[in-house]
Image (cartoon, helix red, strand yellow):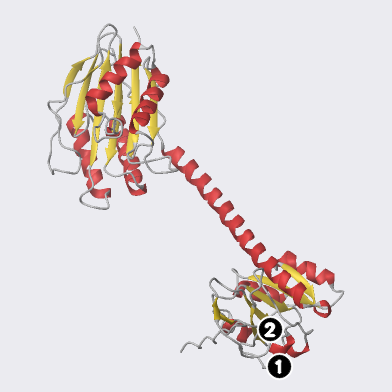
Amino acid sequence: MPVPVPRQRAIPAVEGGQAQAATALGGPVGGPPKEETPRKDGTVEKHHGTHLTLLVIEDDPGGSTVVPELLDAAGNPIRVRTARNLTEAERLLTDDVHCILLDLALPAPVRAGEDDELAVLKHVLQLAPRHAVLALTASGDAERGAEAVRVGAQDYLFRDELDSRLLSRAIRYAVERKRSDTAERRLAEGRVRAQENRRLERGLLPTPLLEGSTLRFAARYRPGRSRALLGGDFYDVVRTSDGTVHAMIGDVCGHGPDEAALGVELRIAWRALTLAGLCGDELLGTLQQVLEHERADDEIFATLCTVDIAPDGRRAGLCLAGHPAPLVARPGRPARLLPYDNNGPALGLLPGARWPRMQVELGREWSLMLYTDGLIEGRVGAGRERLGQDGMVEMVRRQLGEGLRGEALLRAAVNEVRELNGGELADDVAVVLLDRAA
């Protein structure tokens, strides 16, 4: 059965100790509630906000120096509870307590093999890790007080020098210092977590395997999630032992952490299957099985585009699983989209689906750009119009005409799409560029 919490009072009063303890800190038992203060004209002033509450843990409260009144920074009375031992303190330590005044002379729980003069403080710090703590010690025992601060108290006070002004100021200082320390610790913990997440996400982004290939590679990745490095888009490029260069880009529906994790799984599976010799329909069918097994929801699907470029670099096989067709640019010809008439369904939509492989001619010199729909679904201006594939093709044609290539081309494309959208894009964006020079 829970112990009832005592009713709070506006002026220092005992909560769970002897009535004489109230006079030790200068306040009579009783008084008006904290929400109201009588005015001289007979009306009542309403108070709003949270008043400070002090819990005094002292084995002889009546022996303390008399403190007439405790006030917070706004001049409101600080509420006081007293406890004669740790058992009472634990009962009175509710969420509305802001600060604890602990007598270091209080006996600590006896534990086998423990002989520590600050054992009671350590016990209270474990009992109340979120509360400010003031240590009360004998006059002149500054060494013990300093050790108490080192252990975890916010400050220490001498019992014989205690007065209302000093204690009121010490309480306010301790509460603010605890808040500051807690905020700083949480900020430091957040930074550590963010650094760990960034290292993890960077490790999950692919390192292309193109050793021995004459093709130039560039990529641009921009997740839709705020402050994230990885979204539901994924890509990879590898060269197999026969000299064929395989490129892939895909998009898991959604762009949260679960989708990012699934995208990484599909990318790793694609690389393993490609290096094992699978290609085209057989490869995509196996990836669909991976997706169906790993997805958290039956509604989750992924689009995919795979390209396998022949060792001579002049032709390629193309498979599309619900994904936009790549863009190809050749010298003396305007950039255009590769054919997408045989586009198969996205992975995870139709059991037993097939994905035909199309043969496309690339020529002697070319640039091939694979992208996700985040690049084409941004808005154009303040209206509802989207950039679309046609708008993207025109934009890339213009940028190529300005002499942009490789990383510079991708950076300019993503930045312009973002500017046209009027700010950050809502969806993930991934772009891969492969170039073959004459």
Mark nearer the viewer, 2 or 1? 1
Work out whether residue 249 or residue 287 is closer to the camera in this orientation and state it.
249
Height in image: 218 above or below 35? above
Mark 2 surroundings within 10 Å by alpha-carbon count, few (fewer than 14), some (14 through 19), many (20 or more): few
Q: At 38% across and 11% down in the image, what residue appears? A: 403
Residue 286 coordinates in the image, percent (x, y): 22, 39
Residue 344 falls in image quadrant: top left
Q: The residue tagged with tag 1: helix, strand or loop?
A: helix
Residue under pointer 2: 110
Residue 8 falls in image quadrant: bottom right
Q: Earlier in the sequence, mark 2 or mark 1?
A: 1
Q: The residue tagged with tag 2: helix, strand or loop?
A: loop
Which label belongs to residue 397? none
Work out whether residue 200 or residue 253 is closer to the camera in this orientation and state it.
253
Q: At 28% across and 37% down in the image, what residue appears? A: 251
91 vs 165, left or right, is left
103 vs 210, left or right, is right
Residue 245 coordinates in the image, percent (x, y): 31, 22
Residue under pointer 1: 20
Residue 364 coordinates in the image, percent (x, y): 28, 8
Residue 121 coordinates in the image, percent (x, y): 70, 75
Q: At 51% across and 88% down in the image, what residue appears? A: 3
